[in-house]
Image: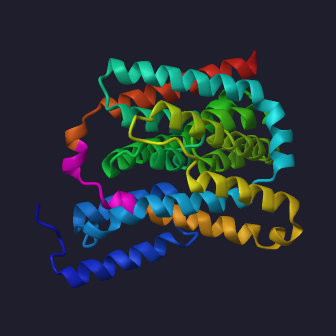
Amino acid sequence: MKYFIQNEKSQRILFILLALLCLTPLVSSPIALALGFALAVCIGNPFEKHLHRYIQLLLQISIVGLGFGLKLNEALHAGKTGFTLTVMSIITVMVLGYFLGNFFKLEGKLSYLISVGTAICGGSAIAAASPIIKPSTKQISLALAIIFTLNSIALFVYPAIGHLLHLSQEQFGLWCAVGIHDTSSVVGAAGKYGNEALKIATTVKLARALWIIPVSLITMFIFKNKETKIKIPWFIGWFIVAIVLNTYFPVFETISTAITNIAKSGLNLTLFFIGSSLSIETLKTIGIKPLAVAVLLWITISIGSLLFIIH
């Protein structure tokens, strides 16, 4: 493929400038992924050979940083509101994802990443599961690309449906927290609907994010083999430590916001790196099957949770 910019020095300068841009609040997670993909398609990735070894490490560090945005008491209190719905939705999506993956003959690890991303909290769940099941960078890239594409759609579709069905602030906030994958899209959609919806959606979503821990532990048992010893990945342990520190040590309250903002920037940068490892050729080789699985799972959790909340 012939790129618009073929000079390697110019490619590197543009890559670095876009990477720095992704560290700013101007760029959201989906945009960071899209920028990386656009760069790969238009000019190529001048650092492709060196990035793969850092992607998972940066994902792990970012997810630990996000732990400083959680407090145990707030998360547990909010979790009571949607605990039953959360458990039901996670079990339904994970089981249905398994059968859909088999039906469409999808790669097991890719199917699992899409399922866990849909069931819990999008990119964060994929980030937590990836070091455990050890998928290829391409599988991580595709799972994130699909999940964030659906997140972008949800940002516009959910508020429209909420108003059409005259959902209350509480109903809509709960629906957002369960039906939309990524926290940023949950907050964006709920914020459009109202302040009360935003409050409920944010707290329930943070409580739901704690399910990363038990699901990650279960994942280790599912994907273990005779050559692999069962052990808790370091980032899960540090994720728990981050929550505890932020909950019980007041000194961290003064820096928790800064840490979580840095973590979100780190996740954006990771998504930019992952997007830059994609290409049109790669997407064409995969076909429509991963997208079909993700869409069916999303429709199931969206309609199912909405009916549960209304009735």
| On-image quarter of the N terminus | bottom left
Residue sitting farthest toward the top: 311
Query: Please, what is the dominant secondary structure of the magenta stretch?
Result: helix
Residue 168 vs residue 48: left or right? right
Q: Nearer the viewer, residue 239 or 27?
A: 239
Q: Which residues are magenta?
A: 273-283
| On-image quarter of the C terminus | top right
Q: Residue 308 location, x and y as percent? A: 71, 18
Q: Nearer the viewer, residue 246 or 286?
A: 246
Can residue 180 be seen here? The reply is no
Q: Residue 204 location, x and y as percent? A: 75, 40
The question of residue 151 being in magenta is answered with no
Can residue 290 be seen here? The reply is yes
**Residue at position x 55%, y 51% in the image:** 233
Q: How many marks?
A: 0
Q: Residue 8 location, x and y as percent? A: 19, 80
The question of residue 277 being in magenta is answered with yes
- Residue 92 in the image: above or below residue 52: above
Q: Residue 81 location, x and y as percent? A: 82, 32
**Residue at position x 43%, y 42% in the image:** 228
- Residue 10 in the image: above or below residue 217: below
Q: Quadrant of residue 246?
A: bottom right
